[in-house]
Amino acid sequence: MSVWTIVVAAGRGERFGGDKQAADLGGRPVVARSVATAAEASDGVVLVAAPERLSAAEALVAGVRGVDGVTVVSGGATRSASVRAGLAAVPDDAEVVLVHDGARPLATGALFARVVAAVRAGADAVVPGVPVADSLRAVDGGPLDRDGVLAVQTPQGFPAHRLRAAHAGGADASDDATLVEAAGGTVVVVDGEPTNLKITRPVDLALAAASLATAGDPSRRS
């Protein structure tokens, strides 16, 4: 099955205070790490960037090791609109489409492989999930059972026709699995990775750098 990955990196980075995709993480831009891992797991990669940062995004991923070429397209006003922009650049004959946040640079090839395998096994939508360690309360103050919830990550994976159909109506959601589920699909959860953090604020970048230093940076291995 042909596998393509859409890497979404079109956010404004307001909570980070700048272009987090260009931030240095162990000597490489954040988004370059995300694209490189996606490329190893895919037949092709589409990077979705903010319109005003299109040229900068192209420069950030130019020459990424192991990447022959990345299609870079402009994103939309919402995350879902950005995914649709990326999906329009995915070839019609792609059979599996993954959607990954550019701000999750530490997702491993093994995680991508688990997601792809679950799609190939017949799932309509696949999401990685990790247990929640913190105690939880609802906004009204009531306690929530953390054993009944998971923190959802990316990459998320889908049969291409399922994802295209879910986006056909132009709806918005916080993630693509939610759209597929709303269109009648079922969601399968695979094991996520505690280190697959999303860089939202500067402290997240520091945590990611510490994780690389502790585990060893695979991008530097021969």
Image (cartoon, rainbow, N blue to C red):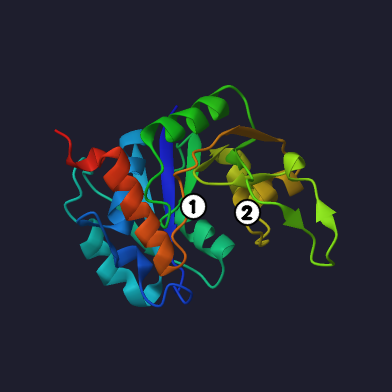
Q: Which residue carries the number 1 mark?
A: 87
- Residue visible at 79% across and 66% down in the picture: 139
- In the picture, the disc for residue 52 is none
The image shows residue 119, relative to residue 105, as above or below, that is: above
The image shows residue 159, relative to residue 79, as above or below, that is: above
Q: Amino acid at mark 2?
A: His
Apparent side of residue 173 relative to residue 192 in the rendered image (left or right): right
- Residue visible at 42% across and 44% down in the picture: 5
Residue 159, image quadrant: top right
Apparent side of residue 15 relative to residue 62 in the rendered image (left or right): right
Where does the C terminus fall, quadrant-wise? top left
- Residue visible at 45% across and 57% down in the picture: 8
Apparent side of residue 42 relative to residue 154 in the rendered image (left or right): left
Q: Nearer the viewer, residue 9 or 141?
A: 141
Where does the N terminus fall, quadrant-wise? top left
- In the picture, the disc for residue 167 is 2
Q: Mark 2 near mark 1, Cβ–Cβ under 8 Å?
A: yes
Helix, strand or loop at disc 2? helix
Q: Nearer the viewer, residue 52 or 136?
A: 136
Task: Say if residue 206 shows up in the picture.
Answer: yes
For this orientation, the residue located farthest to the top is: 121
The answer to which of marks 2 and 1 sits earlier in the sequence is 1
